[in-house]
Amino acid sequence: MRGRLTGLLATGVLMALVALVLNACGGGASGAGGSGGGEHHQQAKVRPLPEEKALRPGEYHSEEFKPPLSFHVGKGWRTSSDLTEAPDRLIIAEGKEVKGFLNLLIFRNVHEVYDSQKHKWVEVNSSKEIVSWFQHHPYHKAEKPQSVMVGGVKGVQFDYVLAEDSPEDAVKSFRYSDGLVASVDSGTNNQGLILDVKGQMVSITIGSATSEFDEFLPKAQKVVDTVKWGGS
């Protein structure tokens, strides 16, 4: 027993010496040269999104939203109890409320859109149908779709606003599985990105008050550029 204990202590001393040498050479997890250890260290920092809390800069992953994704945020982003994550919705906000609107980055996987001409909810089953709905909506003013890539997945993107001749200041757009309804509001600018991710439709919306949009767009785009789908 005594011999075994002595052996374990010797092994511990040896490992400690090795660790000291690695750290001195910059080969540890925090060293500039430790690519393998650094990668493991970064993966350990990926966190689930907290509720009602400012987000520390770093990488976060979805818990409920499908398809699963992760992304990296800088300073200034937060979650809200009013914008809780769901299987078909993940929303984060940046900055303070301006003119009643928040700067929002919204990930959606929904299958119901509102038909303003027939005044009813209709089902959509492909990304092409959602794009067509946006482009032909009587109260949306949408630009021509352009190619985009998000997390290695091809899709399209376009800016859109509520048309000036809209009979309402807020026109219903999507309906989530828990009954919450999203709308396109007067006084806001939006960019939509539509993708097919592993057989599932995903729409990403970058939206804010019109006066804030040009400043907010590149901040939100930085987050979108870090998106990884699933375990990628």
Image (cartoon, helix red, strand yellow):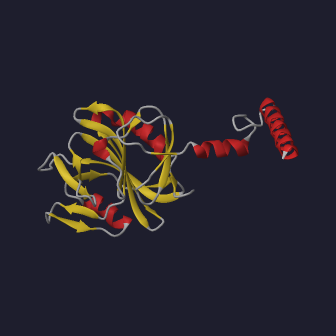
Name which residue lies at 48% across and 35% down: 74
Q: Residue furthest right?
A: 3
Left or right side of 109 for 19: right
Residue displayed at 49% across by 59% down: 154
Q: Residue at x 29, y 37 (%)?
A: 102
The quarter of the picture where the C terminus appears is bottom right
Single out the residue that lies furthest toward the front.
Answer: 1
Q: Where, by quadrant of the figure, is residue 16 drawn?
A: top right
Q: Say whether residue 45 is left or right of residue 29.
A: left
Residue 109: x and y in percent read 36, 60
- Residue 83 x %, y %: 31, 45
The answer to whether residue 109 is above or below residue 94 is: below
Quadrant position of residue 55:
top left
The tally of labels here is 0
User: In front: 137, or 85?
Assistant: 85
As drawn, 81 above or below 173: above
> Residue 60 location, x and y as percent?
49, 45
- Residue closest to the eye, 45 or 220: 45
> At which x and y percent is residue 156?
42, 57
**Viewer-proximal residue among 156 and 18:** 18
